[in-house]
Image: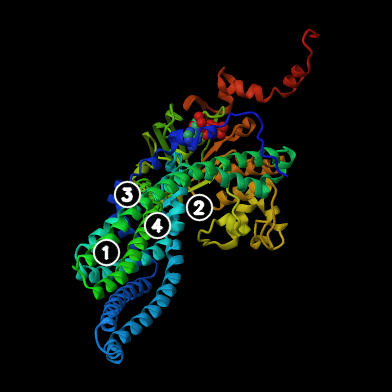
Amino acid sequence: MVEATVPAESDDELDVPLDDDPRWECGKSITTRQMARRLPQLLCRSTALAWRADQPSVIGLLLCQVLSGLSQAFGLLATTGTITALISSGRVGQRLWAAWPSLTVLAAAAGLRAVLGIAVNWLSARLAPLMSQEAELMLLDAAINVELAAYDSPGFNDRREAAEHGAQVSQDLIQEGQDLLSATASLIAGAGVLTALHPVLLPLLVLAGLPQGVAQVRAARVSHLAAMRTVGHRRMLSVLRWHMADTHAADQIRSGTMARFLLGKYRTITDRVNAAERRAVGRGARTALVGAAVGGLASSLVWAALMLLLGTGRMSVASAGTAMFALRTVTASVQSLVGCGARLFRTGMYLDDWSRFLDEADGYRLRRGSTLPSAPREVRADNLVYRYEGAERNAVDGVTLTVRRGEVLALVGENGSGKTTLSKLLTRLYLPTSGVVRWDGVDTREVDPLAAWQRVAVVPQEYARWPLSARQNITLGQPVPLGDTAVWQACEASGAHEVVRGLRSGLRTLLAREWLGGEELSGGQWQRIALARAFHRPAGLLVMDEPTAALDPRAEHRVFTGLRAIATDRAVVLVTHRLTNVTIADRIVVLQGGRVVQQGTFDELVAVPGLFRDLWSLQNDRGTASAAANEVPGEIS
Ligand SMILES: Nc1ncnc2c1ncn2[C@@H]1O[C@H](COP(=O)(O)OP(=O)(O)OP(=O)(O)O)[C@@H](O)[C@H]1O
């Protein structure tokens, strides 16, 4: 059995009680009034969503609803006609004869409503999944086209997660909208009859429905707030689930004997989420109870009013009989309207998360210039500054440098000195907080981003291992004008040709063992594929961030001896901690705290005191360091 205990340590920010956690303020801020104000916009967006998903079904559903409402109204009128005819004076035969036309209308209306009900179900079942799919695609499109910096914005991922839930529940809108429409139709039909019988009955009945309506809307809001407050925790749970189930960490979980710890942590977070949800459910139930009690009292007032009207002779017995029928219909409609309204309100709040995320993502959407660049001959950075959103200091702080085609520029510095951030600025993945990056004299803000990235090749520190074929892992799904010849050339330069030749189906092999026919590569083999990816791209700027960390010496040697040839028609920026590799660079820029503290050739930099020489000495000091470590204090020879 799994034990629920977590080790005594408590160094976790997730230990903050949910209600006190300022990160979920966005959820707390949605009030019923704000929601009501946003409702028209939300309705427009939902209708547009349904319209985008399947126009014929939307038209069909609306038609069915109108017809269904009409048939309900006719049915009720026919009920009144039937009752009036049946309880009128005269012989039974005469009364039945008088009721006959109303009965026919009643039966026809019931039959029509049954058929329309089936049509509505069929159309809803067609439309609902398409709506969710459309909402999800809109979300993915929004997320994939934002500036990279958006992901560094605090809470962005939580809001995206909440929006995903909104996209999933968007399909509920159909059923809830249908229920609301049919409840409204039967309310209007019943209300017409009731008002005709006595004008005081309808307002009384609507008043009776109000307390329950308010209570249910409040309960829906409480439940939504609980979901919002736990969104970060639930995202953490899904990340933990992925780590625990996926093969990539399976060995580390075992060798690190982490199973118990991870399960305990999972359980702790789940408990916290459940507790928050239980609290919300409790509060919702209490609110509903109060609403039901007040509503029940108000309903008895309506019945009392009916009795009073009957008792004081203001209403005939026949009318009172009809009124009872109409009251039951209208009461059911009001209750159903209140229930659907509350459900719709709750779905609306989730959909609002989706809608708000689309707006937020739109604010971050890649909107830069439209100049179409050619592969840059010169990349120049002037006084570049970059600060991550919410950070207290600049990650890159006033950097000026130039790299030209045919050159290899190395960026060197200790962990966190800003090398990766700077390379992302040079490739325009980030826009500088201040300063400017120019490609051949053109400010990169004016350049079309997608066109520019086609001129860039990047080997990041953590490269994606796409569950695609070897060929697609190298071409990244881009057009391949030179066919496999170019793919193989890139493979030769990175050493990936040896890997691909060893695969069962060569370039066609799926690089994911979990799927049928797939094969798995080693870490170094994957890095060769990642390098081939970059070499294959017809780029003017090649950025390589620790490109050979996982390669064996032979493969690393191949890459660095071939780099000069690769640099003939590219500007190369190399980020590395292996200082022996930077001997190949034409220039080395040394960063510290985001600033350039030294630059020059390898020979120049090792010749002078400074950070580079310190790092170089430390890297060549393994023997001495281990000897020192083994030394026993006091035994210096
Ligand atoms: N997404 C991010 N959000 C906030 N701060 C970040 C982010 N990425 C990096 N930083 C911060 O920016 C600074 C520079 O990081 P960067 O990754 O550029 O350093 P680096 O020199 O490449 O480090 P390393 O040698 O470890 O790869 C660090 O202080 C880091 O904490």
Distance between mark 2 and mark 4 Cα atoms = 54 Å
- Please say if 304 is above or below 543: below
Amino acid residing under circle 4: Arg
Amino acid residing under circle 3: Met
Q: Is residue 208 visible?
A: yes
Which residue position is annotated with label 1?
Answer: 307
Amino acid residing under circle 2: Pro
Front residue of 342 and 581 = 342
Amino acid residing under circle 1: Met
Residue 114 place in picture, x, y as percent: 40, 79
Which residue position is annotated with label 4?
Answer: 343
Residue 617 place in picture, x, y as percent: 65, 21
Q: Is residue 411 visible?
A: no
Which residue position is annotated with label 2?
Answer: 538
Circle 1/circle 4 CB separation < 8 Å: no
Nearer the N terminus, badge 2 or badge 4? 4
Front residue of 162 and 206 = 206
Label ID, residue 35: 3
Distance between mark 1 and mark 4 Cα atoms = 34 Å
- Answer left or right for 275 relative to 241: left
Residue 503 place in picture, x, y as percent: 71, 58
Front residue of 492 and 117 = 117
Q: Is mark 2 within 8 Å of ligand 1?
A: no
Q: Foreground mark, 3 or 4?
A: 4
Q: Residues within 10 Å of mark 2 (few under 14, many from 20)?
A: some
Q: Foreground mark, 2 or 1?
A: 1
Front residue of 93 and 368 = 93
Q: Residues within 10 Å of mark 1 (few under 14, many from 20)?
A: some
